[in-house]
Image (cartoon, rainbow, N blue to C red):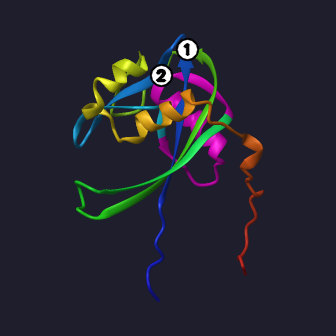
Amino acid sequence: MSEVWKPSVTVAAVIERDGRFLLVEEETSDGIRFNQPAGHLDPNESLIEAVARETLEESAYEFTATGLVGVYMSRYVSSRTNKEVTYLRFAFCGNLGAQQDRELDEGILRAIWMTRDELLACQEKHRSPLVLQCIDDYLAGQRAPLSMIYTHPSVIGVFNG
């Protein structure tokens, strides 16, 4: 039996306030980079739950998704394994809640607010080209309702489909 190929599913929050976007500055294997609050979908979690969790863990802000900005597929060669990795990123916009008094995830240096022009000026420090793409799509008014995303209730058993 051959191994089944699976992309990595990630979520990201595109959060704007007064013309600035919430980003995180993080340590990566390629140096310090900027990204939206983002991360991997965890087992038994919906995409909406994942983006709220990741935003809180990485920025200390509560977040409630209100729309889907876009779904993005990207491929990279991992600098650690030298193998191609495929990501499916679900980017959400929404409402920013209270900032909590909590430590940020390991590797996250700080949360920072930046304008699109500031982001454009430091593209070499973006975690991926999707950082600016998601913001541009958001600024273009690209939104899909959350009703486009369906999460089937968890069922323990064997899928025969």
**What are the residue bounds of the magenta stretch?**
39-66
Q: Nearer the viewer, residue 105 or 72?
A: 72
Q: Are marks 2 and 1 in contact (CB under 8 Å)?
A: yes
Which residue corresponds to mark 2?
22
Which residue corresponds to mark 1?
17
Q: Amino acid at mark 2?
A: Leu
Q: Is residue 16 left or right of residue 111?
A: right
Which residue is depicted at the point 22% across and 54% down? 79
Q: Nearer the viewer, residue 107 or 119?
A: 119
Horizontal and vertical percent for residue 25? 34, 26
Horizontal and vertical percent for residue 16? 55, 20
Q: Is residue 66 left or right of residue 116?
A: right
Q: Quadrant of the C terminus?
A: bottom right
Mark 1 Cα shell of 10 Å, populated few (<14), some (14-19), many (≥20): few
Q: Amino acid at mark 1?
A: Arg
Horizontal and vertical percent for residue 148? 74, 48
Viewer can see residue 103: no
